[in-house]
Image (spheres, rainbow, N blue to C red):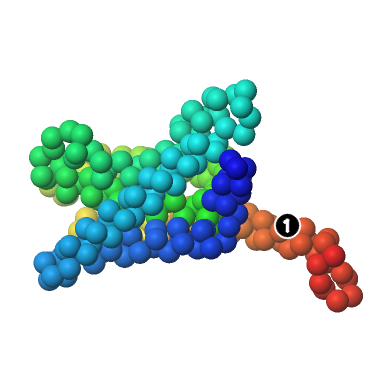
Amino acid sequence: MKKKVRDFINYNKYFIKFIYALIVLNVLTLILESYKELNDNYGFFFYAFEIFSVAIFTLEYLIRIWVSDKTKEDKKERINFAFSTLGIIDLIAIIPFYLPFIFPFDLRVVRILRLFRLLRIFKLGRYSKSLKTIQYIFKETKAELSITVFVTFVLMILSSTLMYYIEHDAQPEKFASIGDAVWWAVATLTTVGYGDVYPVTALGKILSGIIALIGIGFVALPTGIISSAFIEKIQAEKKSKNKDCCPTCGKNI
């Protein structure tokens, strides 16, 4: 029976689509609740849907803990699931609803806890093949992305330090410290350029132009790494599918 339940919650397409739709509707409901007119008129329905969703997510969470021990000898598998990434995400999806009933919170804190309902969208990673692929890509390119982030951080500190010493005398209010110059470095490296902080000296403008050009390459570099890994993953999946297909008609063997 436990195996049948495990297969149902993990592989039944109707159950997966139901949970998928419920998560999307929860995010949509959270957005609609932010409109005062809708919240005043339909607040009861929003709250009723929240109770229904929490009941379903709670039942799913408890069932997943129950079926997580595949062997009777090892009960630690339930604990391992509870502290796994997916287990913690499932718990975070429901715990904000129960906390105000357990601990006396200030109403302002309760409002903040309602924002955690948005984290239910991470449950989609369990059911969406695309999100699983993206998760796999980030895991595979973790080393390359870490190096890129580290180099970008060093470049940001270096450029903000140089700009501070160049522009501090000309603009002591905008470049009051290296920390203030970091905001300029972030806006310049990401090529956003808000325009609220910018150099006025000739040397500062030259440095700003160089940093902006370097920023184009470094901001685009992680995109190239992820895109390359994404293409390789898709090609590998296509080759795997083609192995099980007839070369003549293309049907599965």
What is the residue that sits farthest to the bottom in this orientation? Answer: 249
Label 1: element kind:
helix
Figure quadrant of the N terminus: top right
Residue 170 horizontal/vertical position (percent): 17, 49
Percent coordinates x, y for residue 201 in the rendering = 24, 54
Residue denoted by label 1: 236
Q: Position of residue 148 (x, y in %)?
A: 51, 45
The spot of residue 44 in percent (x, y) is: 17, 62
Q: Viewed as shown, does residue 102 lie left or right of 66? A: left
Question: In the rendered image of this protein, does residue 102 appear above or below residue 210?
Answer: above
**Which residue occupies 38% across, 45% down?**
58
Any part of residue 226 in sight: no
Identified by mark 1, the residue type is Ala
Residue at figure coordinates x 51%, y 31% from the top left: 78
Which picture quadrant has residue 227?
Answer: bottom right
Q: Is 234 displayed left or right of 34 in the figure?
A: right
Q: Nearer the viewer, residue 4 or 241?
A: 4
**What number of labels is visible?**
1
In the image, taking residue 184 as reference, residue 219 lies left or right, namely right
Q: Nearer the viewer, residue 174 or 18?
A: 18
Residue 61 visible somewhere in the drawing: yes
Quadrant of the drawing holding the C terminus: bottom right
Crowd around label 1: few <14 · some 14–19 · many ≥20 (10 Å) = few
Where, by quadrant of the figure, is residue 209 drawn? bottom left
Residue at screen point 30% across, 41% down: 95
> Please, which residue is most extreme toward the front here?
1
Residue shown at the point (39%, 58%) measured from the top left: 23
